[in-house]
Amino acid sequence: MKLNKIDKTVLLIICLTLLVGLFTIYQRVEVEKQYKTAEIVLDYNEMEKFADSSEKDLSWWLKEFKKYGSQSVAIQEETIKLLIQDGKPLRAEIVSKLIENYNWVEFYKPEIVEMIMNKEIDQYDVVVSTKDKETYDYLVSGLNERYTDEFFNTYSFDGVFYIVLDGTADDLYYSPTLRIVNNEGLGVYEAKEISDSRLLNIGIGYDEEKINLIKDANLDVILRPINFPSHNEKLADAYKNANERYNLEPRLYILHGKEVLGFPDNEQNLLDYVMENDISVVMIESSEQREHIKQEGLKDLVEDSGYQALRAFTMWDYIRARNKYYNYEGAEEIENTLFRAITERNIRVIYFKPFYEEEKSTKFMTEAAEYERTFNSLQERLSEHNITLGKAQAMHEFHIGAKRLAVMAAGITLSCVFLFLKMFNIKHKFFNYLYLAAVPASAVPFVMRNIAEKGFSFAAAVSFSGIAIYFFMMHIKKIFISKKQYTNVQLMIYSTLILTASVAISLAGAVFVDAMLADVKYFLEMDIFRGVKFAQILPFGVFLMMFLIYFMNNEQEDSVKSVVNTTIKILNKEIKIYYGIIAGILAVAGYIYISRTGHETNIQPSNIEMISRNFMEYVLLARPRTKEFLIAFPSIFAAVYAASKKSMFYTGLFMLASAIGTSSVINTFSHLRTPIYLSFARTLIALGFGIIIGCILVVVLDWLNKLFVKLQERLK
């Protein structure tokens, strides 16, 4: 790997700009160090169902979970539907469904019947009735506090109390479209049945008995108010009043429903309350474990509050059903899921729901000992990462300036030009003027910051992966063209040095990626680096071009013409069947490799792989990436061995596998929600394992090679 004076100067400048990235990474690590408390928030409704299915009451279970490490219980606002489900003496019906019932008039006073018949109460309205004065007063009090007089009317006839809620067509919820067919199976018409109304699910108030039950267990109460877009002017004040009425500390704001309080047009009241009381806004991670559940107004609330927010993991039903999963005796896999969420994805609130007995079951697992084991084990494992269970706090706001981005953008641009020149083996001095492109590139962050952040991060991911490939290819080529005889120990040492240096180059690219995207919005995954998969694919194209130029181009001229001629020769070659088989295997492997990145495809790890991953998580600080320590890193050793035996085909094949590692290292750091120390530990552990496996591989390959030579001699 020969470098001229300009190359050395350019690399020196890149290293200087890298120092800016390293300083930025240091600042990020300092922010992450202060974000070390995770909170277990119990879901009241689920805990109530769970207690009802067990031999102990809810009060006992709440106190037990407090012992296990839970800090709070989230309780949603009462609704008309919930009151009916709790057995309150209420009737509530949507008028359009009500009038479809035979003799419906017998169930209502004549005055109400007349208003319905005269359209004074229309088909979109909801009629609520009760004979219980206490229930009626509770409803009216809650409605008065939350909504304007135009929204509802109250009536009393002969001891029966009525509340009529004024609805619109938008308030109705429908079942899926039903297709009506005749005897011949031909469609006649389509129909949608009204199944519910938003009016039955608006906030009414809170149950003081439930709140006191939570307090008696020495747990914090987290209120989850409900927004109603049509009448939202008073909702934030009602939320504030409820916290004051029940003497609660509003530490967390967890949305219930699809919008923040006051959306649309009246979100300012909630923002003021959040800012005044240092309330952390909770963003719930989506089921794909990427970004968050879409809730209107949430992003604006977080940004306007100065990113006074944190991430939450809700226990989806399929997670709760992972009891006795992967041949575990208990809920170990659920514990693993919670552990990964907290340590790897910056989750700081676990919205907890009790476990199910087993997969595809909705029967609760009610063994207290298993919950205690799960929480104790989780806390013990988290302690190795200096994370404790307690009351969660928002991440500190962190941003970097455009000047800093400009310096790093210049360094990344220089790396791109350096890779371009080396990839095509361009030696003409004229092309060195391309390095001047770094000057205008440094101005991009000042005029297009968002594009600069992601664009230069992508460029860094590709260029440094490519430079790492160039580095190991040039050193392997030296061995390939050398006439020296190497011992296995020498090959192991050379391979270790080449691999370590290649990983170091990739880590430099990772520093630029993480530094360019060093912003709290990325830590909280309110924004993501969307070029991850493409940044993993492009380096393979870089590899193929360099392999063609540096290994397969036999002409002395360093020109495009010679490369084209070499390509034509390759295309005209007769392809052996086993070449086609290997190409097919590589194509399938490549598809699986790209598809397995992320959680958006159906290609997921096998049970055996998951069990092995779980084992490594238990015994190591961070689980190394399988494709790195088991495939990419050992392949460097195999490529070096093949090069020493002058086998171009196997040298190229193993180097291609090695190219996975250069992009994978950067990809590890491209998951910006993951703490830096964890990504770094994961890479170092993978490097260590890769070296060990690589050394073993050299011995195995040498034995196979000797065996092959003996067989050839016998067959002569």
Image (cartoon, rainbow, N blue to C red):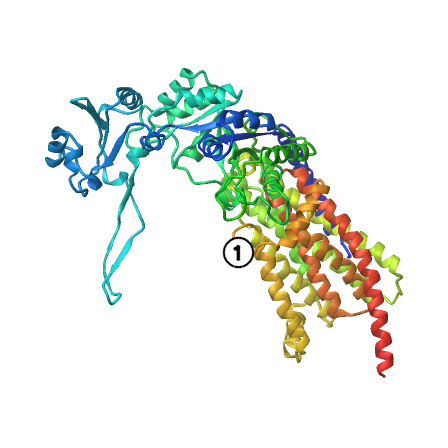
Quarter of image, res 185: bottom left
Quarter of image, res 16: top right
Q: Position of residue 270 (x, y in %)?
A: 40, 25
Q: Residue at x 61, y 46 (%)?
A: 438
Q: Position of residue 313 (x, y in %)?
A: 52, 37
Q: Position of residue 137 (x, y in %)?
A: 27, 20
**Of residues 554 and 312, the one drawn nearer to the viewer in this rendering:** 312
In the rendered image, the quadrant that contains the C terminus is: bottom right
**Of residues 504 and 592, the one drawn nearer to the viewer in this rendering:** 592
Q: Is residue 392 visible?
A: no
Return the residue at label 1: 602
Q: In the figure, 99 relative to 712: above or below?
A: above
Looking at numbered disc 1 in the image, what kind of residue is underneath it? Asn
**Of residues 578 and 604, the one drawn nearer to the viewer in this rendering:** 604
Quarter of image, res 551: bottom right
Q: Judge left or right: residue 667 versus residue 706.
A: left
The single residue placed furthest to the front in the displayed view is 55
